[in-house]
Image: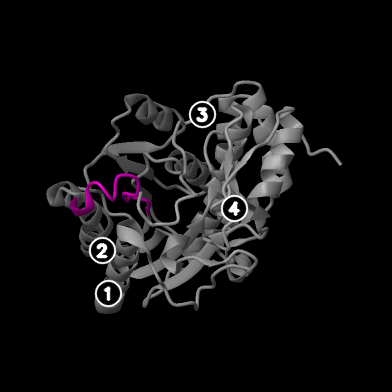
Amino acid sequence: MECPRGPQTVDELDEWLSRPSPQAVATLAAHDGDLLVLGAGGKMGPTLARMARRATDAAGVRRRVIAASRFSNSGLRQQLESWGVETIACDLLDDQAVAALPPAPNVIFMSGLKFGATSNPALTWAMNCYVPALVCRQFRHSRIVVFSSGNVYGLVPADSTGSRETDPPEPLGEYAITVLGRERMFEHFSRTLGVQVATLRLNYATELRYGVLVDLAQDVWAERPVDLAVPTVNVIWQADANAMTLAALAHATAPSRIINLAGPEMLRVREVAETFGQRLNKPVRFAGAEGRTAYLNDGRAGYPLLGEVHVTAAEMIAWIADWVARGGPSLGKPTHFQVRSGKY
């Protein structure tokens, strides 16, 4: 059965990605106070901030939704403000700038460094471990939802259901180690200062301009060989991830808690590429033998807390194929999901 039509323009896509779920609306109705998104200039931050604004309006409550970022892209800042999101230019490595941020009972922490971690490990440690300490001290009385990564678990069998929250972390490489360091900073201050924290280990947010499925579609479209080193992936539609993030504000605790944020389907890279080949009418070539392990995240324990996933992998694949075939824009930021060494 053919999937429903997906977004056709960037404006329509941003509208879809920022539609709040009923659970997101209920969460923001139940928790008073302003909401501050730290590191809002990344791939997910703008539509998450817009969703928070829309959920707040739908809940009929008064709240400032504030996005803080360095905002090297002035157009993004203007776009957020056109959506009713206040913006603050802030370098989170600057302790005085962090101290000047407005108090907010609800904080979403999205800041971090991944790509370039190997070439600049000192900055990686500063961004991923020092900044969380500054934020915890400044917002010790807030509820904080923290973005982490499924990479902290390490590689698991490719035919498994993925890592669970109770599995011990086995980070590989400077990036994953410092992401675990981020978690430990929030955990420490949650235990010592009573900061309420929910940590979300994410694998992998996807929309039409960015994500693992976009990487595969672009390889097929360009007739490049598809790397099979990481043979299985699981992804989640970014709107679902945004809505579940807002719902996580209701589950921030002291000591902190960990929740996996991931789609329910384990996708074979080979089969996804072949499906793109059929939809794009392109031949598909593969490179290397299929690996036996992958970064996989079991998100099932989070669904009763954060809400269900509403967009299937089949829908994402159909929408992305249509987008790529029509020449839709890309963010130009490959995920490098095929990397097995932990070096980014």
Instruction: Using the image as rendered, state which of residue 25 and residue 205 is in the foreground.
Output: 205
- The extreme right residue here reads 1
Quick check: 3 left or right of 52?
Answer: right
Looking at the rendered structure, which numbered label has been put on residue 136? 2
Q: Which residues are magenta?
A: 109-122
Q: CA distance from mark 3 to mark 2?
A: 35 Å
- The x, y position of residue 299, in whole percent, is 59, 65
Q: The residue under label 3 is which amino acid type?
A: Ser
Q: Which residue is mark 1?
A: 188
- The x, y position of residue 32, in whole percent, is 43, 58
Q: The residue under label 1 is which amino acid type?
A: His
Mark 4, Cα crowd under 10 Å, few <14 / some 14-19 / many 20+, is: few
Tell me which numbered mark, 3 or 2, is placed earlier along the sequence: 2
Q: The residue under label 4 is which amino acid type?
A: Ala
Q: CA distance from mark 4 to mark 2?
A: 45 Å
Q: Secondary structure at mark 4?
A: loop
Q: CA distance from mark 3 to mark 4?
A: 29 Å
Q: CA distance from mark 1 to mark 3?
A: 39 Å
- The x, y position of residue 99, in whole percent, is 17, 52
Marks 2/1 in contact by CB < 8 Å: the verdict is yes
Asked if one can make out residue 239 in the rendered structure from this viewpoint, the answer is: yes
Q: Is residue 112 magenta?
A: yes
- The x, y position of residue 236, in whole percent, is 59, 51
